[in-house]
Image: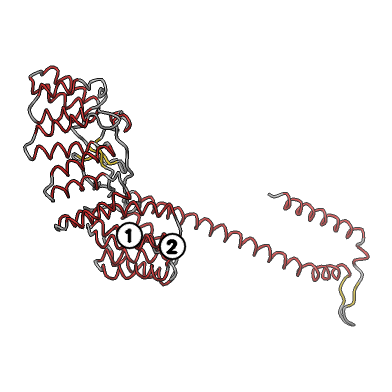
């Protein structure tokens, strides 16, 4: 019992006792007849009681009604709060199910929520997204259409509608929705353009992707966002490179060369562009110029990719002596000779010159003690020389240092591994980011003489290339 209630009851008891005591003292006076009319009269005590009730009951009734109303409102508010908390917990469970890929459970939770809150923005948006993920694009479209009627100025709903139409196979309608976002919401259409560009990139449609990229650059430039402009400029570099690749495939060599010159003027350490520069010279039937281009690339960047391309070039032309002399000459280029010496040993191994390979690699045993690629190659050389015990020791050393194979490559942007070098990472879509995995072998770029160039990455987290 509350203190206020207890005091009220106590006061009422004291008042009742006082009234009884006073009434007992004035029994004769209270028994006097009080005339209401010439013929009707009551005792004075009853008259006082009636007067008291006529003045007290209305006030008490009003106070009681207000108290009951307040109590009911409080009970209703607490009930609604409990229901809201329950619905919020249900929504959070649905989000957790969605993140875990449990689409059926997420759908059931959101369907129940929608029955309770049929116009809730977040529930409509997420329920449609879950339905689309379950392959029910038509139902998702209906949900998001309802949301678009309730929230006609929501850009998020329009993006969901575009995804619904795309999932249903109506690419033209999806494109129209994205164009509407650009037209009606110019400040928020950047995401749609990026999504369109990334979709074009996943289809390897470099020409249209470049057009979309130019629109993105124009929007960002108009907004004056320098950091975003720098990011998009990096993507533009990659697209320019792909355009040059396309031109070269179409035998438009001079156009490809001019485009590469422009690209390398802006980004002189763009490895794929430097490699392609040599390929252009090969198409021109000038192998010496090609080798010279790759040598300049190695001198500028120090990437082992150039050494590999030079080696492959001479092996393909059955000119092993030229390959050996070129790698010998490159030992004096740059701040470190570790890579040329390592690749020279690798070349000797490819040419079945195992004694020379052993001598070249043995001279690197201290510098490359922590390299798994070194121990793997050393094991192969020792095996071919017949030193099986030493070969086994090298293989075990390689296994202890992660057990990777020869020449493993890694993307500096996303960490994806591949067995051979690529100009563009197939996992994250970055250009100029794939390098020989020396970094994980406890060697810094400075120790190897490699001068890192910026990776040209796609900066949209929601995009995953399909090529």
Name the residue at 28% across, 30% down: 448
Residue 93 spot, x, y in % from top left: 40, 51
- Mark 1 touches mark 2? (CB < 8 Å): no
Residue 406 spot, x, y in % from top left: 18, 32
Q: Which residue is mark 1?
A: 213
Front in this rendered view, residue 70 or 308: 308
Name the residue at 41% across, 54% down: 228
Q: Left or right of 1: which side holds 112?
A: left
Residue 374 spot, x, y in % from top left: 20, 26
Name the residue at 41% across, 59% down: 220
Residue 370 spot, x, y in % from top left: 27, 24
User: Secondary structure beneath disc 2?
Assistant: helix
User: Secondary structure beneath disc 1?
Assistant: helix
The Cα atoms of the two marked residues, 1 and 2, are separated by 14 Å
Rendered view: 367 above or below 11:
above
Front in this rendered view, residue 278 or 128: 278
Front in this rendered view, residue 153 or 226: 226
Question: 10 Å neighbourhood of mark 1: few (<14), some, or many (≥20)?
Answer: many
Residue extending farthest to the bottom is 38
Task: State the mark number for residue 222.
Answer: 2
Which one is earlier in the sequence, the residue at label 1 or at label 2? 1
Total numbered labels: 2
Name the residue at 10% across, 21% down: 355
Front in this rendered view, residue 406 or 145: 406
Rendered view: 325 above or below 35:
above
Q: Left or right of 49: which side holds 192?
A: left
């Amino acid at each position: 019992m509350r203190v206020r209630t207890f005091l009220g009851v106590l006061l009422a008891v004291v008042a009742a006792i006082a009234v009884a005591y006073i009434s007992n003292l004035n029994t004769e006076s209270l028994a006097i007849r009080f005339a209401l009319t010439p013929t009707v009269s009551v005792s004075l005590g009853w008259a006082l009681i009636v007067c008291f009730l006529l003045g007290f009951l209305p006030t008490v009734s009003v106070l009681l009604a207000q108290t009951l109303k307040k109590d009911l409102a409080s009970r209703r508010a607490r009930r609604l709060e409990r229901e809201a908390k329950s619905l919020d917990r249900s929504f959070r469970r649905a989000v957790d199910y969605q993140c875990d890929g449990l689409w059926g459970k997420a759908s059931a939770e959101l369907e129940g929520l929608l029955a309770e809150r049929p116009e809730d923005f977040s529930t409509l948006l997420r329920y449609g997204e879950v339905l689309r993920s379950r392959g029910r694009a038509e139902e998702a479209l209906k949900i998001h259409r309802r949301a678009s009627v309730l929230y006609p100025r929501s850009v998020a709903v329009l993006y969901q509608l575009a995804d619904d139409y795309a999932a249903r196979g109506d690419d033209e309608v999806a494109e129209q929705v994205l164009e509407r976002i650009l037209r009606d919401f110019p400040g928020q259409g950047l995401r749609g353009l990026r999504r369109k560009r990334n979709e074009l990139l996943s289809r390897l449609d470099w020409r249209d992707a470049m057009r979309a990229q130019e629109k993105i650059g124009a929007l960002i430039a108009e907004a004056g966002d320098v950091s975003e402009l720098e990011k998009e400029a990096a993507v533009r570099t990659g697209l320019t490179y792909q355009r040059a690749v396309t031109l070269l495939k179409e035998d438009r060599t001079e156009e490809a060369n001019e485009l590469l010159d422009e690209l390398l003027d802006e980004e002189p350490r763009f490895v794929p562009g430097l490699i392609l520069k040599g390929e252009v010279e090969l198409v021109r039937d000038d192998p010496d110029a090609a080798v010279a281009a790759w040598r300049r690339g190695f001198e500028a960047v120090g990437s082992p990719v150039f050494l590999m391309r030079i080696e492959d070039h001479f092996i393909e032309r059955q000119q092993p002596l030229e390959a050996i002399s070129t790698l010998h000459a490159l030992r004096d280029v740059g701040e470190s000779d570790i890579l040329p010496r390592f690749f020279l040993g690798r070349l000797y191994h490819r040419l079945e010159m195992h004694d020379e390979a052993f001598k070249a690699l043995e001279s690197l045993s201290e510098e490359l003690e922590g390299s798994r690629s070194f121990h793997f190659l050393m094991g192969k050389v020792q095996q071919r020389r017949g030193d099986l015990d030493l070969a086994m020791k090298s293989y075990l050393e390689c296994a202890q240092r992660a057990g990777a194979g020869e020449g493993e490559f890694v993307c500096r942007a996303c960490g994806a591994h591949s067995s051979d070098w690529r100009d563009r990472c197939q996992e994250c879509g970055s250009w100029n980011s794939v390098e020989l995995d020396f970094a994980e072998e406890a060697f810094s770029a400075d120790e190897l003489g490699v001068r890192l160039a910026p990776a040209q990455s796609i900066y949209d987290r929601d995009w995953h290339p399909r090529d």
